[in-house]
Amino acid sequence: PALCPATVVTGYDGSGSDGVISVVDASIFRNGEVVRVYNPGTSVSQEKSISAVNSAAKTITISGLLSVTPTNGYTICSFPLDTNAAISARQLAHSHVADGGSYL
């Protein structure tokens, strides 16, 4: 298995009913997939459905809002854990390791 693609958060707009996450590279995500938002080295993480991706604007729109505001330049967006029932086959190919563990 390959390492899970990840990108760093550069901004977050939670002013509407759906959150908009600005990232360094939105092209690794697809509409309808799930994004895992987490802070490295901590237990702070959430997985949200993606309702829109704009690679040119470098934004990911999620269904609903994050419960914690991401830290610009620190918070990571990546693929969900392989235990998420909504994970796509494309994401699953990169989200687990042969020993059964998950990248966090």
Image: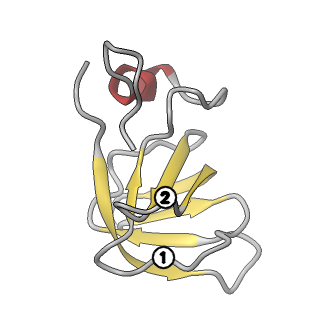
Q: Quadrant of residue 99?
A: top left
Left or right, 96 with respect to 68, comes to left
User: Which residue appears at 49% of the width and 58% of the height?
Assistant: 37
Category of crowding for the residue at label 1, using alpha-carbon neighbours closer than 10 angstroms: few (below 14), some (14–19), many (at least 20) = many
Category of crowding for the residue at label 2, using alpha-carbon neighbours closer than 10 angstroms: few (below 14), some (14–19), many (at least 20) = many
What is the CA distance from the residue labelled 2 to the residue labelled 1?
A: 8 Å
For this orientation, the residue located farthest to the left is 2
- Residue 68 spot, x, y in % from top left: 60, 75
- Nearer-N-terminus badge (2/1): 2
State whether residue 50 appears in this view. Answer: yes
Image marks 2 and 1: residues in contact by CB distance under 8 Å: yes
Reading the image, the residue beneath label 2 is: 37
- Kind of residue at disc 2: Val
- Looking at the rendered image, the quarter that the C terminus falls into is top left
User: Which residue appears at 56% of the width and 55% of the height?
Assistant: 52
- Looking at the rendered image, the quarter that the N terminus falls into is top left
- Residue 69 spot, x, y in % from top left: 55, 80
**Camera-side residue of 90 and 67:** 67
Mark linked to residue 70: 1
Vertical order, 102 against 14 (above or below) = above
